[in-house]
Image: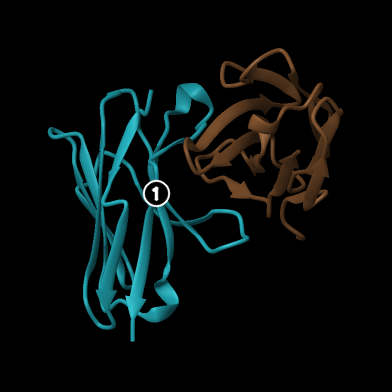
Chain colours: A brown, B cyan
């Protein structure tokens, strides 16, 4: 298996623009997680899905952030409008209902 | 608020030495305690994990020690090697939250030759 796939790997955008991050989980996994990593806050959970349904989005920082999982093999995290404080590395991870999560390589987002 | 506290923030160890990283938690609902290793530019990768029904788990040079009553757990890296230089994160999760991970702030380990 190719592992968790994320795109793009790097994104540079200007404040106010819409940003869409994409994730393809490992086939057969029924849990999908979005995390954000910053120097100040470390790794923090944003939202997770089970069987394509959002279960806990309490970590989503504000209404500018939204996430969808239209099918078992694809998820998006959208920021609209983006702000400089959104600059971070965003990770997607998937798991099979057990405890182990497998992380993707991350998307490094820079908002100017 | 940080549900898992990790120390030290950084650690320098000589090759062949023992690296020790400590974590503490408050939520007694946590039932799974993994350690992740992260190299620059990569995503975190599971290193070793423990459940609270055992006090120690060993895999090769990596050992987790778990103290349920103190709500503390630690990672020991024996015979540390330069290739172990990375950032290490402890985490805690529970089945009733889908095993969503609550991470510590991370420890940057440097193993010198």
Q: Quadrant of residue A49?
A: top right
Seen as rendered, the residue at the extreme bottom is B113
Tell me if I can see residue B33 in this picture: yes
Q: Quadrant of residue B112?
A: bottom left
Task: Name the residue nearer the viewer: B29 or B84.
Answer: B84
Seen as rendered, the residue at the extreme left is B69
Tell me if I can see residue A31 in this picture: no
Seen at 35% across and 28% down, the residue is: B3
Seen as rendered, the residue at the extreme top is A63
Q: Name the side, left or right, on which A46 lies relative to B111.
A: right
Q: Quadrant of residue A74?
A: top right
Q: Is residue A54 above or below residue A95?
A: above
In percent of width and height, residue B9 lies at 32, 51
Seen at 61% across and 49% down, the residue is: A102
In percent of width and height, residue B96 lies at 47, 21
In percent of width and height, residue A78 lies at 80, 27
Seen at 42% across and 29% down, the residue is: B94
Q: Which part of the image, by quadrant, shows the N terminus of chain A? A: bottom right
Seen at 33% across and 87% down, the residue is: B113
In percent of width and height, residue A22 lies at 82, 40
Write down the residue under mark 1: B106
Q: Residues within 10 Å of mark 1 (few under 14, many from 20)?
A: many
Task: Name the residue nearer the viewer: A21 or A95.
Answer: A21
Q: Is residue B26 above or below residue B33?
A: above
Q: Secondary structure at mark 1?
A: loop
Q: Name the side, left or right, on which B107 lies relative to A48.
A: left
Q: Is residue A98 above or below residue B40?
A: above
Task: Name the residue nearer the viewer: A84 or A24.
Answer: A84
Q: Which part of the image, by quadrant, shows the C terminus of chain A? A: top right
Chain ID for label 1?
Answer: B
Seen as rendered, the residue at the extreme front is A112
Q: Name the side, left or right, on which B67 lies relative to A64.
A: left
């Amino acid at each position: 298996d190719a592992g968790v796939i994320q795109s793009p790997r790097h994104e540079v955008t200007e404040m106010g623009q819409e940003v869409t991050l994409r994730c393809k989980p490992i086939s057969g996994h029924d849990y999908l997680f979005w995390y954000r990593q910053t120097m100040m806050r470390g790794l923090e959970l944003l939202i997770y899905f089970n069987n394509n349904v959002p279960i806990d989005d309490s970590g989503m920082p504000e209404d500018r952030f939204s996430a969808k999982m239209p099918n078992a093999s694809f998820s998006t995290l959208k920021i609209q409008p983006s702000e400089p404080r959104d600059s971070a590395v965003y990770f997607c991870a998937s798991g099979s209902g057990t405890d182990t999560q497998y992380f993707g390589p991350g998307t490094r987002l820079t908002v100017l | 608020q940080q549900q898992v506290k990790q120390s030290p923030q950084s650690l320098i160890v000589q090759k062949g030495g023992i690296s020790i990283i400590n974590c503490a938690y408050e939520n007694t609902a946590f039932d799974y305690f993994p350690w992740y290793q992260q190299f620059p530019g990569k995503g975190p990768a599971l290193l070793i994990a423990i459940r609270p029904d055992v006090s120690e788990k060993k895999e090769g040079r990596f050992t987790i020690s778990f103290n349920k009553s103190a709500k503390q757990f630690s990672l020991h890296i024996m015979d540390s090697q330069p290739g172990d230089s990375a950032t290490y994160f402890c985490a805690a999760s529970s089945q009733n939250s889908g095993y969503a991970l609550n991470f510590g702030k991370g420890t940057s380990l440097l193993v010198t030759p």
